[in-house]
Amino acid sequence: MSNKVSHDEAVNLMIPIAQRAGIETVWDRYEQQQPQCGFGSLGVCCRVCWQGPCRIDPFGEGPQTGICGADANTIVARNLVRGIAAGTAAHSGHGKHIALTLLELSEGHAPDYSVKDEAKLQRVAKLLGISVEGKEVMEIAKEVAEKTLDDFSRQDEAIPCTWLENTLPKERLAKLGKLGAKPHNIDGAVADIMARTHIGTDADPVNLLLGGIKSALADYTGMYLGTELSDVLFGTPQPVVSSANLGVIKENAVNIAVNGHNPLLSELVVDVAAEMNEEAKKAGADEGINIVGICCTGNEVLMRRGVSLATNFLSQELAVVTGALDAMVVDVQCIMPSLTKVMECFHTELITTMPTCKIAGATHVEFATETAAESAKEIVRLSIEAYKRRNSAKINLSDKKSTVYAGFSAEAIVGALAMVDENDPLKPLIDNIVNGNIKGVALLAGCNNPQVVQDASFTTIATELAKNNVLLLATGCAAGALAKGGLMTPEATEEYAGDTLKAVLTAIGQAAGLNGPLPLILHMGSCVDNTRAVAVATALANKLGVDLDKLPVVASAAECMSEKAMAIGTWAVSLGLPTHLGVVPQVLGSPVVTEVLTETVKGLTGGYFMVETNPQAAAAKLLAAIEERRAGLGL
Ligand code: BF8
Ligand code: SF4
């Protein structure tokens, strides 16, 4: 294995420690998988039915159809849209869980939760067209939850999801309507994909891809409501300073990592930990309990609570290899099943919490809304017990950590801009885009993937775009990478921003009382929080009176991997954004699908995918896309 698997020095230093201890990591397993199957890589392997598996010969010499007669175009399109549907189910299931919790709270069945942000609840109610006049908080909460849940159960196809219809520019909605791509029911959109990809059903690749767009928009809808209702329950993020990287794991504390995605449990773990500090100290941990985050749960609690971020997806196993992680509490998604094996070498407790995400060998503490705090306490107790079993001979702490400024919700960004122009907060941003001080906006999103050097592409693309005066937003594991790399700081702005971007970030930072520039990259949160970026873009579009595909706004998923990323990328394109993928998607076996995703779709939505594995070249392409949009606006 090459010793430079990551751009993150903490990772590169921890891997040899794992190797010496005979611990296998994701990079070892990646090597064991080489060479990866060419049929799968091209997307031309079909396992939809038990006549198969079937595969298409990409060189044209062997079979060109599966046993049922499906050709490469159909097989590739089916595989892709099934991935999008899985991503949609994952995101929107998370969102539904939050909405159901809000409903239970409003009905008095979720005693450990509260509406932490009443102003946000009011804003959300207004967004959904619910009148708040003379109503109690819980009455509004109930109506908001019910109206949200309607988006999961509506049977009238003529009525699109409220959370879609009320959050996008009118022109965009009209365009999506013409494509027949507006979902009326999030769960229905997922079921529709599963049904039409059953053997012998939809065999028109373009029709399948349109179904994929509809599912991706259901994904957008589920993410949007998940994010906004999380803010209602736990507070809307505001700028916060914290630390990121493996160095946040401390020697003298009970270290508990929260890993996964859903803030419902992790928020309570953070609350309960504060109450149980004394117990930890009694067990010998002088610094009490230290909660750290991994992946998107990490981003959630970083954004709202300033909890430090231990690492992102690819290096989650290495948090255990420090030997000082006492427990990892996981909810759903992007949790490596290998963790139990790594933990066999340590005292660390893996605690699963969700009925749909158990891992053989882990301790399961079932999480229920009614008794959430009790579960959180049990988890913290188990962690303290584990701490007592720590083996000091196996401790290998990292000294790597960076400062990170996070908490840039749409509200926080508008709030900072309002310090410059109280009456018209978006004006300073628009003026600076128009005069070219800010060339455009890029959203850096998505996962890690061992097919590329961890965090490296994000770093190159971010610094390259910043040098060219592009305003940067980040979410998910991209944000984790950039936080670990120290790029989410005012110092990074000084070092890497082009002159005009630096001047703008400094002016806003000063006005907002930061005593320096805004950080180089604004951390907007977890993956479901990508919709926060859409909220800002939609506000800009509405103010300018143009559709989203006219804005100099681009997206990049330089290390994408998950099915959720497939869904997000597809809705970004559906909303009109040029969207970069730094990993080759498994579609090249179909000329039709490849053509539609990179070219034809431009005529339908204005957005398109750009595939570029070289980060330097990717930055150039993103810049060119921004310039093209500027030219279109006459800038
Ligand atoms: O939702 S970025 S690896 S942790 S899928 Fe997973 Fe990808 Fe990370 Fe978050 Ni998003
Ligand atoms: Fe083969 Fe068709 Fe079955 Fe796919 S659906 S496995 S192509 S027979």
Image (cartoon, rainbow, N blue to C red):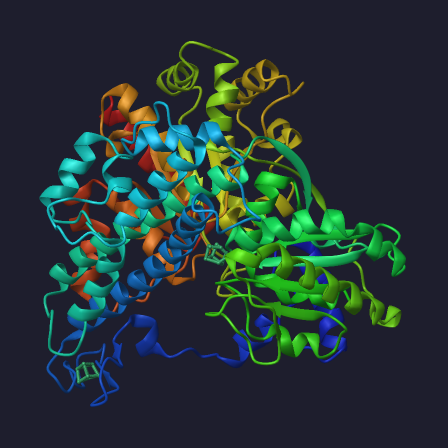
Q: Is residue 52 above or below residue 260?
A: below
In the foreground, 167 or 593? 167
Query: Residue 487's spot in the image, x, y percent?
Result: 61, 39
Q: Residue 343, relative to residue 378: is it above or below?
A: below
Q: Is residue 458 visible?
A: yes
Residue 216 location, x and y as percent?
27, 53
Tell me the residue at 58%/71% (across/down): 27
Task: Say which residue appears at 11% left-offset and 78% top-offset.
Answer: 200
Side (left or right) of 482 relative to 167: right
Image coordinates of residue 367 in percent, x first then y, are 55, 63
Q: Nearer the viewer, residue 535 or 136?
A: 136
Quarter of the image with the C terminus is top left
> How many tags in the picture?
0
Question: Whole-percent x and y of residue 253?
Answer: 82, 55
Q: Would you identify the image quadrant in which residue 388 lies?
A: bottom right
Q: Is residue 434 above or below residue 138?
A: above
Residue nearest the observer in this picture, 371 or 496: 371
Relative height, residue 242 to residue 380 (above, below): above
Q: Which quarter of the rendered picture does the N terminus lie within?
A: bottom right
Q: Is residue 284 left or right of residue 169?
A: right
Determine if residue 260 is in view: no
Q: Which quadrant of the structure image shows residue 491?
A: top right
